[in-house]
């Protein structure tokens, strides 16, 4: 029985330490890291006599299950997979010790109720970690070509057709922007766009309308300086959804990152026919912002095939366009040309 206790305590310590490191170094979450550290220290035995008994009972070289190969344990697809696997590993070990403590509590000095509470606490921690890592993964995909499907620039074409062609041409992010039609009319369109993006591993963003983003299960929401404040939007969005914000100055960009923006769109880079009320930012501001924020940086406003290379070289991770793609007769080819220039410019850096 002591060998079972020893093995499961070791699994708990190892698994919790890995989760703690992910919260500390990947998520930069001091609260979660501290909570995991506290649980780890609280669960591992402090009784010197028990420690000696467990060490004496250990027979690692005789463990018949030590090197049994399980195909699913051969590799992890990503950090989320690592977190899930280790969370479940710890949870299972906690349940084992909980049951053993009910029978041999006095003999081992283990408190079964402590293991039960830790197990339920870890269920919640796992959920928080997976949701935040999912959000981080989505934000990391805000790279390359970002196409804004603007209702006033469709020229009679359907949103879903334009989006599909843009994605085929290399677009990584699709944003639905419509300041004219009511949300009820936009919801089925948004849901179609969400499906198209999901099929191609592209990110789907809704402009301005939080309710539409939630109802369509969009990957995220984008707001401007005069829209819903970033701090409020972040509070109302599910933990796994990303939030982007427009900014025209260094001060705005830094503030939006602090309040929870997962990416910042800087613009207008150049004069644009798509919006008449834009504030100029330019390449100088873009370079300044690049030095001060760590989230993905999207350049927007008047970007086309002639100037997109300058924008990428100035530090943009992504470029948001409307006219440069929707203004073309062939959306796919226009997207391909921009994507090629972006890729070439990035490789120079």
Image: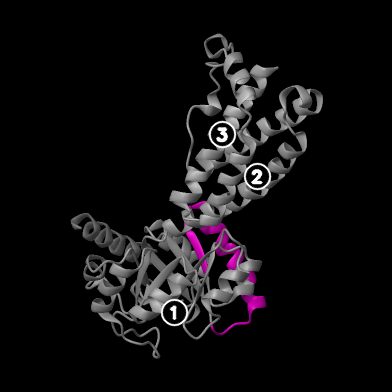
Question: Can residue 348 be found in the magenta stretch?
Answer: no
Q: Is residue 305 left or right of residue 23?
A: left
What element does badge 1 sit on?
helix
Residue located beneath label 2 in the image? 122
> Residue 44 versus residue 27: which sits nearer the camera?
44
Residue located beneath label 3 in the image? 13
What element does badge 3 sit on?
helix
Label 1 – label 2 distance at C-alpha: 49 Å
What element does badge 2 sit on?
helix
Q: Mark 1 vs mark 2: give the one in front.
A: 2
Q: Mark 3 vs mark 1: give the one in front.
A: 3
Measuring from the top left, give residue 111's x and y in whole percent.
75, 34
Residue located beneath label 1 in the image? 153
> Residue 302 versus residue 224: which sits nearer the camera?
224
Mark 3 or mark 1, earlier in chain: 3
> Residue 213 versus residue 134: which sits nearer the camera?
134
Please state the extent of the stretch shown in magenta in the rendering.
Answer: 179-205
């Amino acid at each position: 029985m002591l060998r079972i206790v020893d093995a499961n305590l070791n699994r708990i310590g190892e698994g919790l330490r890995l989760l703690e490191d992910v919260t500390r170094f990947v998520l930069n979450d001091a609260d979660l890291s501290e909570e995991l550290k506290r649980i780890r220290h609280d669960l591992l035995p402090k009784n010197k006599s028990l420690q000696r008994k467990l060490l004496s009972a250990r027979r690692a070289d005789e463990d018949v299950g030590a090197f049994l190969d399980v195909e699913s344990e051969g590799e992890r697809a990503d950090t989320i997979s690592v977190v899930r696997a280790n969370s479940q590993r710890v949870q299972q070990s906690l349940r084992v010790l909980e049951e053993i403590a009910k029978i041999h509590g006095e003999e081992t000095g283990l408190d079964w109720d402590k293991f039960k509470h830790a197990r339920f606490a870890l269920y919640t921690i796992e959920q928080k970690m997976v949701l935040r890592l999912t959000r981080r993964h989505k934000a990391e995909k805000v790279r390359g070509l970002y196409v804004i499907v603007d209702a006033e620039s469709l020229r009679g074409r359907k949103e879903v057709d334009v989006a599909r062609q843009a994605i085929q041409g290399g677009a990584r992010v699709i944003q639905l922007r419509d300041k004219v039609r009511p949300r009820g009319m936009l919801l089925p369109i948004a849901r179609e766009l969400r499906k198209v993006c999901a099929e191609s591993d592209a990110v789907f963003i809704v402009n301005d309308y939080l309710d539409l983003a939630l109802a369509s299960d969009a990957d995220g929401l984008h707001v401007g300086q005069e829209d819903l404040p970033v701090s409020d939007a972040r509070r109302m969005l599910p933990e796994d959804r990303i939030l982007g914000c427009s900014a025209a100055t260094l001060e705005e960009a830094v503030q939006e990152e602090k309040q929870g923006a997962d990416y910042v769109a800087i613009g207008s880079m150049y004069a644009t026919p798509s919006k008449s009320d834009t504030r100029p930012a330019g390449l100088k501001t873009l370079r300044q912002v690049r030095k001060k924020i760590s989230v993905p940086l999207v350049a927007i406003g008047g970007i086309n095939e002639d100037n997109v290379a300058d924008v990428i070289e100035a530090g943009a991770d992504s470029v948001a366009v409307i006219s440069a793609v929707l203004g073309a007769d062939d959306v796919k080819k226009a997207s391909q040309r921009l994507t090629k220039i972006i890729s070439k410019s990035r490789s120079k850096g």
